[in-house]
Structure formats: structure tokens, C-alpha cells
Image: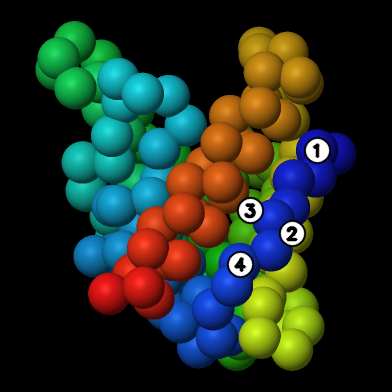
Amino acid sequence: MITVHNTIGASIDKVWDCWILPEHIKNWNIAIEDWYTQDVENDLKVGGKFKYKMAKKDGSLSFDFEGEYTKVENLSLIEYKLVDNRIGRVSFEKEESEVKITETFEPTKQDSESMQKEWCQTVIDNFKKYVEELKAH
């Protein structure tokens, strides 16, 4: 399993909304500079599906990152299973005026674990920056 985390200086409500709402996800879900999240579908409930369409900015490649939610605890935990049966979880821990977010997931076999950890950490870091910049405005 791979684990990444960060601490976000915002309320639990703001952090949760930014993590689950498609209009926010499109703005922070980026692991590599020349890619972006083109489209997001998110039905956050047990048995609900999610699908993020990832695309290269030059239009040369795209793929769907998709799965199904297996456990949802409002403002604290999201567990999921991807279409390739790998599992993951994201926990949200309120700490005074901050929220610690931790994501743990099964790596793919085709990419190195260190690369996957770096990609996911970049996404979590982008999330922190996005939420904290939103809060500042």
C-alpha cells in the first residue's frame, strides 16, 4: 500500500466539499503539469460511482480513472474500489483549525511505487494549495 498525506489550513466542511464536488476536483486533481482533469462524475454514496477523465493538454492521450465507493462516513472517511479491483481510502481528521488528509491505496503493477507515490503526493499538495487559496479570497 502507498500512503500520502498533507494538512490543510481550512475547515473540515471546506476541505470535504473541495474533495468531493466536481467543480472543485477539476481544479486540483493534477499529478503531471501537462495533464488536466477534463470531466468529473461523482456520486458519493456506498455503491455510487466516480469517474475522472484525465487528458493531456495537447489532446494526444486520455484515460478514465474510475471506481465505486464502498464506505462513506460524512466529513471523515471515503473508501473505494477501482475498476481494476485495487482499493483505497481517504481519511479526514479535524485538528483545531486544520484538517489532516491521508490517502492510502494499492499501487498498480505497471508503474513504480515511488512514481505512484510522487504522483499522488503531488495531487494532495495541489489540493492543499487550491483549498488554502480559495479560503484566502
Which of marks 4 and 3 precedes in the sequence? 4
Quadrant position of residue 35 = top left
Q: Quadrant of the C terminus?
A: bottom left
Q: Position of residue 73 (x, y in %)?
A: 66, 86
Dot 1: element: strand
Please, which residue is most extreme toward the right here? 1
Mark 1, residue position:
2
Mark 2, residue position:
102
**Disc assigned to residue 40:** none
Residue sitting nearer the eye, 122 or 109: 122
Q: In the image, what residue type sits under mark 2?
A: Thr
Are the residues at dot 2 and dot 1 in contact (C-beta closer than 8 Å)?
Answer: no
Are the residues at dot 3 and dot 4 in contact (C-beta closer than 8 Å)?
Answer: no
Mark 2 vs mark 1: in front: 2
Mark 4, residue position:
8
Marks 1/3: CA–CA distance: 15 Å
Which of marks 2 and 4 precedes in the sequence? 4
